[in-house]
Amino acid sequence: MTSYTDGDEQMSYNVGSFPKDFGYGNFEHEESQSSSDQKPRILLMGLRRSGKSSIQKVVFHKMSPNETLFLESTNKIVKDDINNSSFVQFQIWDFPGQIDFFDASFDSDMIFGGCGALVFVIDARDDYIEALTKLNQTVTKAYKVNSRIKFEVFIHKVDGISDEEKQETQRDIHQRATDDLADSGFDQILLNFHLTSIYDHSIFEAFSKVVQKLIPQLPTLENLLNILVSNSGIEKAFLFDIVSKIYIATDCSPVDMQSYELCCDMIDVVIDLSSIYGSDGAVDSQSASVIKLNNSTILYLREVNKFLALVCILREDNFSRQSVIDYNVLCFREAISQVFELRTKNQKANGDGSTDDEDDDFDSNINGSSIVQSENSILT
Ligand SMILES: Nc1nc2c(ncn2[C@@H]2O[C@H](COP(=O)(O)OP(=O)(O)OP(=O)(O)O)[C@@H](O)[C@H]2O)c(=O)[nH]1
């Protein structure tokens, strides 16, 4: 029988092109880390072999997609601590596919109580009727315990499926899932759908959106990026978590997949080169890189802190004012460190257990003082 006891904390990394020790260490300004229990939780649920463990391994442990073919079935909850900067701190719980909500050892209050987001994975290549039934059971059960959970449905393994087929599958799953919820009297539950595959960047993009919803400072970060972009002639800017390549914030212009992929590839190139030629770690405060594309576009990467990098896309003409951009990036970096400091101060003041309400206060503080200050110092 499945046991729902605590799983192993998986802290070793199979990091592909990353240096072996390039994982989520302690953030140097973070004097006190939130305990694991206080971190928001992301639950990975879905039928057996739908691809849950593969997603977690590929996104957070740099496992190559082909290696996931050899993953064994999960038979207990596996908890994984993602201990990054103050912005990216959560736990991922990977559930066995054959989970039984009626099992006496399934403590739904404990499991769904502290849950920030529930990711339900559906294998798009399989007959998904059973998966939809399970989705309905899972979501309604979780909602009854905690109505604040964000529900994300990954329509997974869409590699090798034509674009029309993808859209049709998404439309069908969306329709059936929302109809099922309405039939069970839960039409107030909002499901978000993402087409994903571990064989391309779609899984990183989808996970970025899930993680962003768990970052209370997101509006502040977006605001800072908007100010930076509009004053520096930048077309698009992403704030990346370097280790996982998920972006934790971007400016308000729409994200197109190609730009995101280019930026991810740039991070890979920089990490690879830094690991070979750099002296200490993969990135440091001097880390920067410029890639000129053959369509008069520039990719510009700057380190923000140990875990975060800013990657910008801009036209070559606008890059002639690089010193202005660099100055603005310095202001941006300073503003981000102020956000960190305030966050840490708030956490300490609240005994490390800041709630959403406290984070709201935090946001208004930053918007009221620090951003204005950085806005003034950004050159136009
Ligand atoms: N084609 C394709 N195969 C995938 C993808 N993601 C996962 N797989 C494959 O799906 C199979 C099952 O993956 P797992 O990650 O073990 O699935 P799981 O949901 O964790 O399974 P349980 O632990 O049994 O619940 C593996 O052979 C993976 O290689 C994907 O995006 N595309």
Image (spheres, rainbow, N blue to C red):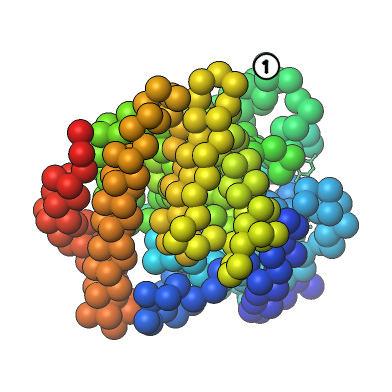
Q: Residue at x 55, y 18 (%)?
A: 295
Image coords of residue 371 (percent x, y): 18, 50
Left or right position of 98 against 212? right
Q: Residue at x 46, y 58 (%)?
A: 286
Q: Residue at x 25, y 34 (%)?
A: 231
Residue 346 versus residue 298 in the image, above or below: below
- Front residue of 28/187: it is 28
- Front residue of 73/58: it is 58
Q: Is residue 99 visible?
A: no
Image coords of residue 205 (percent x, y): 55, 41
Residue 328 versus residue 149 in the image, above or below: above
Image coords of residue 219 (percent x, y): 28, 47
The quarter of the picture where the N terminus appears is bottom right
- Front residue of 134/354: it is 354
| Number of numbered labels in the structure image | 1
The quarter of the picture where the C terminus appears is top left
Q: Amino acid at mark 1?
A: Glu
Residue 35 versus residue 295 in the image, above or below: below
Ligand 1 neighbours mark 1 (CB distance < 8 Å): no
* Res 369 quadrant in image: bottom left
Left or right position of 316 against 74? left
Residue 319 versus residue 80 in the image, above or below: above
Q: Residue at x 79, y 28 (%)?
A: 160
The residue wearing badge 1 is 164
